[in-house]
């Protein structure tokens, strides 16, 4: 089984849809709002490049085609109490980025987990990130945290990861609950669909040679956005906070990232 970015017939996003003004920028001249939109997209591109550089195992992220402020994710857990489970999540970034609170991570379908809201699927991160600033914190940190909270062997380890003192359950109780409530969980994850072109979709290949071809490309060819980043900043490094002491930039609501391309294996 392989997973691919879904191909759909979603209407192409126009430039006016990509950079609509919100109330905070209505009074700004067109050039100012456009520069702000470009800056936001560039910073989000840097955030995505930083995630790629971490080389997290078994975690896959795809920025939404429709919105620059939503990323889709899938991760495969290979050890701990959730070993063998597949999780699908989305990262929601505030439209006020970079002057924003911590990005939210929403799991759907919602797994049973002591740090997840049972109604919304939102991961509780306040104990780990009690203060969030875009000059010091990066989106890959919340992705790393989301992965870590599913890779633990006992409750004591989870409390250490999440920086919390108390959880009202024990390890064996949680283990039994996972086995009881998540028997068909992977099937639900695999069968989920979304109209977004960049949504991570699972498909059954017509023949096994497709898997071999994809594996060869992943092992032999390295796709990088560094060349794009170098156009703006040396070696893809984030801009120095000294150059932007407040990072108090005007904000806009923009659609999908222009540099996020579909990956198609022929």
Image (tube, grey):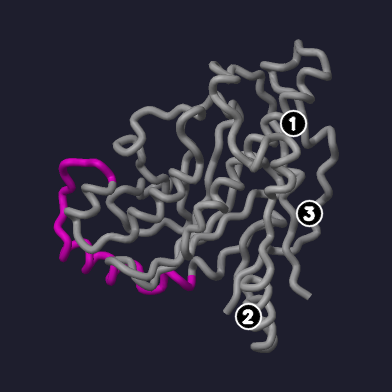
Using the image, determine if residue 28 lies above or below residue 216. above
Q: What is the secondary structure assignment of the residue under circle 1?
A: helix
Q: What is the secondary structure assignment of the residue under circle 3?
A: loop
Pair 2/3: label in front:
2
Q: Is residue 149 left or right of residue 243?
A: left
Please state the horizontal and vertical placement of residue 97, each as a whole percent of the image: 58, 29
User: In the image, which residues are magenta?
Assistant: 162-187
Query: 58 or 118: nearer the eye?
Result: 58
Residue occupying image coordinates x 48% and y 55%: 108
Q: Which residue is mark 3?
A: 10
At label 2, counting other C-alpha atoms closer than 10 Å, the crowd grade (few under 14, some 14-19, many 20 or more) is few
Q: Which residue is mark 1?
A: 38
Quadrant of residue 184 in the image? bottom left
Give the spatial CA distance, label 2 vs label 1. 38 Å
Residue 173 bears which disc, if any? none
Q: Which residue is mark 2?
A: 204
At label 3, counting other C-alpha atoms closer than 10 Å, the crowd grade (few under 14, some 14-19, many 20 or more) is few
Please state the horizontal and vertical placement of residue 207, each as a whole percent of the image: 68, 88
Q: How many marks?
A: 3
Using the image, determine if residue 90 lies above or below residue 171. above
Q: Is residue 133 left or right of residue 82?
A: right
Give the spatial CA distance, label 2 vs label 3. 22 Å
């Amino acid at each position: 089984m392989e997973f691919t970015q879904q191909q759909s017939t979603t209407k192409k996003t126009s430039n006016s849809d990509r950079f609509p003004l919100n109330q905070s920028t209505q009074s700004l001249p067109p050039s100012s709002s456009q520069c702000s939109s470009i800056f936001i997209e560039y910073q989000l591109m840097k955030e995505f490049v930083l995630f790629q550089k971490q080389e997290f195992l078994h975690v896959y992220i795809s920025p939404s085609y429709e919105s620059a402020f939503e990323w889709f994710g899938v991760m495969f857990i290979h050890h701990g109490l959730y070993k063998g489970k597949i999780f699908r999540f989305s990262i929601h970034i505030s439209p006020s980025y970079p002057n924003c609170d911590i990005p939210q991570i929403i799991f759907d379908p919602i797994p049973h987990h002591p740090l997840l809201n049972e109604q919304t699927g939102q991961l509780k991160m306040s104990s780990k990130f009690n203060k969030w600033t875009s000059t010091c914190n990066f989106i890959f940190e919340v992705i790393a945290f989301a992965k870590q909270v599913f890779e633990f062997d006992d409750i004591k380890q989870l409390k250490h990861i999440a920086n919390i003192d108390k959880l009202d359950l024990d390890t064996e109780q949680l283990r039994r609950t996972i086995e009881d409530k998540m028997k068909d969980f992977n099937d639900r994850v695999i069968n989920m669909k979304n109209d977004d072109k960049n949504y991570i979709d699972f498909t059954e290949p017509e023949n096994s040679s497709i898997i071999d071809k994809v594996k060869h490309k992943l092992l032999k060819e390295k796709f990088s956005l560094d060349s794009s980043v170098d156009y703006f900043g040396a070696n893809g490094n984030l801009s120095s906070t000294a150059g932007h002491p407040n990072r108090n930039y005007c904000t806009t609501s923009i659609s999908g990232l222009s540099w996020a391309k579909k990956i198609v294996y022929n």
